Image (spheres, rainbow, N blue to C red):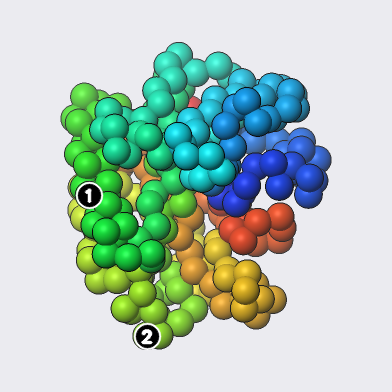
Amino acid sequence: MKILSWNVNGLRAVAKKGFFEWLEKANPDIIGLQETKAQPDQLDESLLKPKDYHAYYHSAQKKGYSGVATFSKIEPTKVQYGFGIEKFDSEGRVLMTDHGDFVLFNIYFPNGKKDQERLDYKMEFYEEILKYFDSLKAQGKKLVICGDYNTAHKEIDIARPKENEKISGFLPIERAWMDKLVDHGYIDTFRQFNKEPNQYSWWDLQTRARARNVGWRIDYHFISDNLLPHLKNAWIMPEVMGSDHCPVGIELEF
């Protein structure tokens, strides 16, 4: 089973840049999209009902902001929009789909760069969502947590660690939460297969950082440790254009 995740930075925008041609070629069983920036009533039929996929949208109340979408070839047994905390759910950040063998979380984690208030919001989101993951894991559920985490975990995951250690996305407090995620039994799938530096999933558009590969790895598939025996591969797709992020993928076998 192939699962992809991609922050598309505007679903309607990426649809005009060959998204469907790419999707057909990439052929994932499931794809989680983040930062869709669209309400369902703003989408045409091709996006609401993509060929070969069941599509689910969780949009922010604020138009043109945030939002996630999950496309799955096999209809999930359960779909949940958000995780029960209104101030987070109103921003359309979490879609949960139950696929039997595992539960997929497609998440657009908050960005804390704007100001202290948004950083506090991000850190509270981190703490609350981890409690939610743990509650499901305690029931024996196997979790796949994909999306834009908006934090580079380790120095290897960012091109210029020293210059960014006081910038949200690489703050000690944010990185400490990533450590906590690992301590709670969740695994960074990509680093199971690739320990090399210079592997990034986001590049700043304004500075044309992508051409120089001056990037951040902030898009991940973490899995609960009880799913590790089923993990067969994980990768990043920097060759795929259309957004300031690129897709990331995993392969599971059951």
Residue 88 quadrant: top left
Going 55% across and 64% down the picture, which residue do you hit?
202
- In the rendered image, residue 141, in percent from the top left (x then y), is placed at 30, 27
Q: Which residue is mark 1?
A: 124
Q: Is residue 155 left or right of residue 116?
A: right
> In this orientation, which residue lies closer to the viewer: 103 or 190?
103
**Which mark is on residue 162?**
2
Going 48% across and 55% down the picture, which residue do you hit?
219
Give the vertical position of 82 relative to 18 (above or below): above
Give the vertical position of 72 relative to 208 (above or below): above
- In the rendered image, residue 49, in percent from the top left (x then y), is placed at 69, 22
- In the rendered image, residue 61, in percent from the top left (x then y), is placed at 45, 34
- In the rendered image, residue 104, in percent from the top left (x then y), is placed at 43, 32
Crowding near pointer 2: few (<14 within 10 Å), some, many (20+)?
Answer: few
Q: Nearer the viewer, mark 1 or mark 2?
A: 1
* Mark 1, secondary structure of its residue: helix
> In this orientation, which residue lies closer to the viewer: 184 or 34?
34
Query: Mark 2 is on which residue type?
Result: Lys
* Mark 2, secondary structure of its residue: helix
Does the residue at mark 1 contact the one at mark 2 (Cβ under 8 Å)? no
Camera sees residue 2 = no
Q: Is residue 130 left or right of residue 75?
A: left
| Whole-number angstrom distance, CA of label 1 to CA of label 2 | 26 Å
Camera sees residue 10 = yes
**Which mark is on residue 27?**
none
Q: In the image as oriented, which residue stretches furthest toward the bottom?
A: 162
